[in-house]
Image (cartoon, helix red, strand yellow):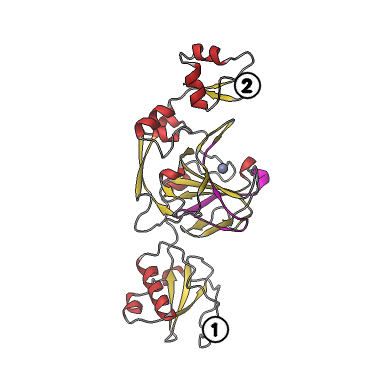
């Protein structure tokens, strides 16, 4: 049964190689393995790297162990007939364009200088393809959605995690930011990954960061542990999806409760980048929501004053902000007026 499981695993590795599966990684003991021929952590000449050959699969060789090499995307696989082969886990391939465009390991939001007006109205994104897969960063209910939250924008979703829960990379990519709390404002210990599909994902409030800046990661690879670092009450994962620095509701692409991807691709509309746009709306509603006008309360402002200034009614303002007519307006707070 166990052998069959491993054989099936080779098949998965060979034909898909999309998930950085740890199932085959056992301890490195192998009685009959000739330590002089090859040892763990040797540097492997790049031209000698081969995939596990189809014959290995056809003749049903049974994999009994794997050994790490210096390159985390190359493993040495040991078979029951005392032969071995390299196992290529396929380092993620990211186009040079994506890797060099506003790449910055210091600034958390590296696209700040990019003018959103230069982005097209519709941006098609292939979320996964034959080479790169998907894994939900964590499977849990969304405890706080992508929305405008009183005083500030909540540019991602919160997922309830326990301290120490494993947090995984959503797609293949390269780590742009892996910084401790003191460098990230409210994000706490933060990982930002730029993906092969052009998106970036943010993982905040981690208790421990496991990857390093500039490291390549596969979808599903553990990148950190859940925590409560930074501006956080109670342990949770703050997760963001961004394109060219513009955040959009992660629930547009991921069902966090089941841990599944909602579709293989998405066409990002420009209005999705508004904090008032979310996955529950139709595109028409999203567009209308993105055109909302927000007023920052100043001394002397009243609901009736604002209603006449913006050509609306007190009732409408109250409804939009979920407040009552008697709510005290606090200077500096933001109010949706239309
Ligand atoms: Zn959050």
The residue indicated by pointer 2 is 328
- For the residue carrying disc 1, how many other residues have a C-alpha within 10 Å: few (<14), some (14-19), or many (20+)? few
Count every numbered label the image shows and give the total: 2
Q: Is residue 320 left or right of residue 235?
A: left
Q: Which is closer to the viewer, label 1 or label 2?
A: 2
Q: Position of residue 335 (x, y in %)?
A: 54, 24
- Is residue 312 shown above or below 183? above
The residue indicated by pointer 1 is 35
The answer to whether the residue bearing label 2 lies less than 8 angstroms from the nearest atom of ligand 1 is no
- Which residue is located at x 58 percent, y 41 percent? 107
Q: Nearer the viewer, residue 246 or 101?
A: 246
Q: Nearer the viewer, residue 154 or 82?
A: 154
- Is residue 318 shown above or below 18? above
> What is the secondary structure assignment of the residue under circle 2?
loop
In terms of sequence position, does the residue under pointer 1 or pointer 2 come before the other? 1
Q: Position of residue 150 (x, y in %)?
A: 57, 31
- For the residue carrying disc 2, how many other residues have a C-alpha within 10 Å: few (<14), some (14-19), or many (20+)? few
The answer to whether the residue bearing label 1 lies less than 8 angstroms from the nearest atom of ligand 1 is no
> What is the secondary structure assignment of the residue under circle 1?
loop
- Which residue is located at x 36 percent, y 72 percent? 11
Residue 266 lies in the magenta stretch: no
Q: Position of residue 71 (x, y in %)?
A: 51, 66
Magenta span of residues = 154-183
For ligand 1, which image quadrant applies? top right
- Is residue 59 shown above or below 185? below
Q: Nearer the viewer, residue 162 or 214?
A: 162
Distance between mark 1 and mark 2 Cα atoms: 75 Å
- Which residue is located at x 51 percent, y 65 percent? 72
Q: Is residue 327 visible?
A: yes
Q: Is residue 337 visible?
A: no
Q: Nearer the viewer, residue 86 or 223?
A: 223
Residue 171 lies in the magenta stretch: yes
């Amino acid at each position: 049964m166990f052998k069959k499981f491993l054989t099936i695993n080779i098949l998965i590795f060979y034909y898909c190689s999309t998930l950085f599966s740890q199932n085959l990684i056992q301890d490195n003991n192998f009685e009959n393995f000739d330590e002089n021929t090859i040892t763990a952590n040797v540097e492997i000449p790049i031209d000698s790297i081969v995939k596990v050959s189809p014959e290995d699969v056809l003749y049903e060789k049974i994999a009994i162990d794997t050994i790490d090499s210096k390159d985390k995307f190359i493993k040495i696989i040991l078979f029951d007939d005392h032969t071995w082969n390299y196992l290529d886990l396929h380092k993620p391939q990211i186009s040079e364009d994506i890797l060099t465009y506003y790449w910055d390991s210091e600034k958390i939001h590296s696209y700040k200088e990019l003018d959103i007006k230069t982005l097209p109205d519709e941006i098609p994104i292939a979320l996964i393809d034959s080479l790169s897969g998907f894994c939900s960063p964590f499977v849990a209910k969304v405890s706080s959605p992508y929305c405008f939250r009183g005083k500030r924008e909540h540019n991602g979703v919160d997922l309830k995690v326990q301290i120490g829960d494993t947090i995984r990379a959503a797609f293949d990519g390269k780590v742009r930011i892996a910084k401790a709390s003191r460098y990230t404002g409210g994000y706490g210990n933060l990982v930002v990954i730029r993906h092969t599909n052009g998106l970036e994902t943010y993982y905040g409030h981690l208790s421990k960061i496991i990857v390093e800046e500039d490291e390549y990661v596969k979808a599903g690879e553990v990148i950190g542990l859940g925590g409560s670092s930074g501006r956080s009450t109670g342990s949770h994962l703050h997760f963001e999806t961004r394109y060219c620095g513009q955040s959009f509701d992660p629930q547009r692409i991921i069902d966090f409760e089941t841990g599944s991807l909602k579709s293989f691709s998405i066409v990002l509309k420009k209005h999705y980048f508004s904090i008032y746009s979310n996955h529950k709306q139709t595109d028409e509603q999203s567009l209308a929501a993105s055109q909302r006008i927000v007023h920052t309360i100043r001394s002397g402002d009243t609901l009736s004053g604002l209603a006449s200034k913006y050509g609306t009614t007190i009732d409408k303002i109250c409804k939009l902000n979920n407040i009552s007519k008697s709510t005290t307006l606090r200077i500096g707070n933001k109010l949706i007026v239309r």
